[in-house]
Image: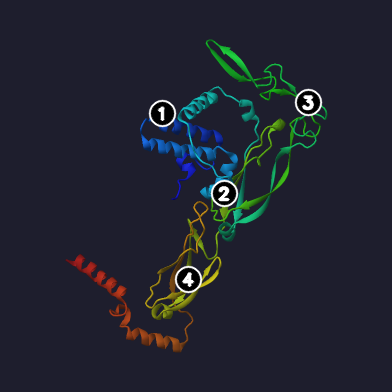
């Protein structure tokens, strides 16, 4: 049984961040939770799907594995990630959802979210062969990395940053406005929660420096244009040892001289002469694994498509192999000598000309249709 796409279950895009995924989960979980749909088996099943999708997409390692390998990443025996089971306790889950809503409203861990390093995107071009079969590529990206001199602290050696006395390390200050208490960014430490009195001379107190980083990227087989993979913690380093952002690799597959890709199918055109089209024969067609012989039946018309099962692209989601679809194009001969022209002239006469009824059924139907069209105009 083919499982639904986790992103579709939550109604989010593949590029959605953790906050967007959490919002989508809470909205759907509140709607379909069994406590609010007593006795509704469909709602219970839907809730299990939502929870399973959230358990994967909210976990950076599991999400990265899913982005690369789909549901097969969690099949038993697959080493890319440990398998999991989805279960729930209605009372505890409902309480967790309720608590997370209010946690977001009152801005918990706001300092950590603000100081987290930025996400990065790298656009990579692939040949069709690399996209279909997978590859390993080395990339170099300019980014902020943790300062090795101060180990990311932003201070000189043997010194430590001090806690901001105004916000007491939270980066936020509670401001009273009538009946309400409002949080504002601390103006003294600018939301960082710390004060650096002796900054590192190498990174100037930032805890990170800009330099090139080299990464080896494993590209899964079956990737396509506009697909993305997410590398957790490979984005910009955060200030003062804060968490790093993520790196997104977006792919573009270059145009191939022979094949065109449509989903998991490959298309190509194979020219044949009209003698083979009329009498039949055997031709060689290209595949990404080499040449393959196929039989052309007699009386084959131009544009006929031969489907070769399993010679397309292996799906990155469900491991299903697409097909190779070869379209034969009957080619008109060129540069004929006088003997060849004479033979064709004799053949044409034997066929009864352009309107030959016995040998050219399509031509007959066409010209009969034209005649009826003009007859109708003169009525």
Name the secondary structure under disc 1: helix
Q: CA distance from mark 1 to mark 2?
A: 35 Å
Going by the picture, which residue comes out furthest to the top? 178
Real-space Cα separation, disc 4 to disc 1, in angstroms:
61 Å
User: Element under label 3?
Assistant: loop
Residue 35's tag is 1
Counting residues from the start of the chain, the first of labels 4 and 1 encountered is 1
What is the CA distance from the residue labelled 1 to the residue labelled 3? 50 Å
User: Image check: 47 left or right of 61?
Assistant: left
| Residue 41 shows in the view | yes
Seen as rendered, the residue at the extreme left is: 379
Residue marked by disc 4 = 270
- Which residue ends up furthest to the right in the rendered image? 158
Secondary structure beneath disc 2?
helix
Q: Is residue 227 something one can see in this rendering?
A: no
Gap between marks 3 and 2 measured at Cα = 41 Å
Side of 301 where 144 appears, left or right: right
Q: Residues within 10 Å of mark 4 (few under 14, many from 20)?
A: some
Q: Could you give the CA–CA distance between mark 3 and mark 4, rounded to whole angstroms?
A: 71 Å
Residue in front for this viewpoint, 333 or 173: 173
- Report the residue marked by disc 3: 160
- Residue 245, quarter of picture: top right
In the structure shown, which secondary structural element does the residue marked by tag 4 occupy?
strand
- Circle 1 or circle 3, nearest the eye: 1
Do the residues under discs 3 and 2 have CB atoms within 8 angstroms?
Answer: no
Position of 179 compared to 364: left or right?
A: right
Write down the residue under mark 2. 68
In percent of width and height, residue 73 lies at 55, 48
In the picture, residue 340 is in which quadrant?
A: bottom left
Indicate the position of residue 297 as horizontal and vertical percent values: 40, 76
């Amino acid at each position: 049984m083919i499982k639904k796409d986790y992103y579709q279950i939550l109604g989010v895009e593949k590029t959605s961040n953790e906050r967007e995924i959490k919002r989508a989960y809470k909205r759907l979980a509140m709607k379909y939770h069994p406590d609010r749909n007593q006795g509704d088996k469909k709602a219970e099943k839907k809730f299990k799907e939502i929870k399973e999708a959230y358990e994967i997409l909210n976990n950076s390692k599991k999400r990265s594995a899913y982005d690369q390998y789909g549901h097969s990443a969690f099949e038993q025996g697959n080493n890319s990630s440990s398998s999991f089971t989805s279960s729930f306790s209605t009372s505890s889950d409902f309480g967790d959802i309720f608590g997370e809503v209010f946690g977001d409203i009152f801005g918990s861990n706001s300092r950590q979210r603000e100081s987290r390093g930025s996400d990065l995107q790298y656009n990579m071009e692939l040949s069709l062969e690399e996209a279909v079969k997978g590859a390993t590529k080395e990339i170099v990206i300019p980014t902020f990395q943790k300062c090795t001199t101060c180990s990311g602290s932003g201070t000189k050696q043997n010194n430590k940053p001090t806690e901001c006395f105004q916000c007491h390390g939270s980066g936020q200050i509670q401001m009273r406005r009538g009946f309400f208490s409002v949080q504002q960014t601390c103006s003294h430490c600018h939301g960082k929660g710390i004060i650096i009195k002796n900054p590192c001379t190498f990174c100037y107190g930032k805890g990170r420096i800009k330099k090139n980083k080299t990464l080896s990227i494993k590209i899964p087989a079956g990737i396509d244009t506009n697909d993305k993979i997410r590398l957790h913690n490979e984005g910009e380093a955060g200030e003062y040892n804060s968490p790093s952002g993520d790196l997104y690799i977006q792919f573009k597959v270059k145009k191939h001289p022979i094949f065109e890709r449509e989903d998991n199918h490959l298309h190509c055109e194979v020219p044949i002469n009209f003698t083979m089209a009329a009498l039949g024969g055997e031709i060689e067609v290209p595949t990404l694994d080499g040449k393959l012989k196929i039989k052309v039946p007699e009386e084959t018309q131009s544009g006929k498509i031969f489907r070769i099962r399993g010679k397309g692209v292996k799906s990155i989601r469900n491991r299903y192999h697409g097909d190779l679809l070869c379209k034969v194009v009957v080619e008109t001969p060129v540069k004929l000598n006088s003997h060849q022209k004479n033979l064709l002239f004799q053949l044409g006469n034997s066929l009864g000309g352009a309107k030959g009824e016995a040998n050219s059924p399509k031509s007959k139907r066409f010209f009969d249709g034209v005649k009826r069209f003009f007859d109708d105009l003169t009525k």
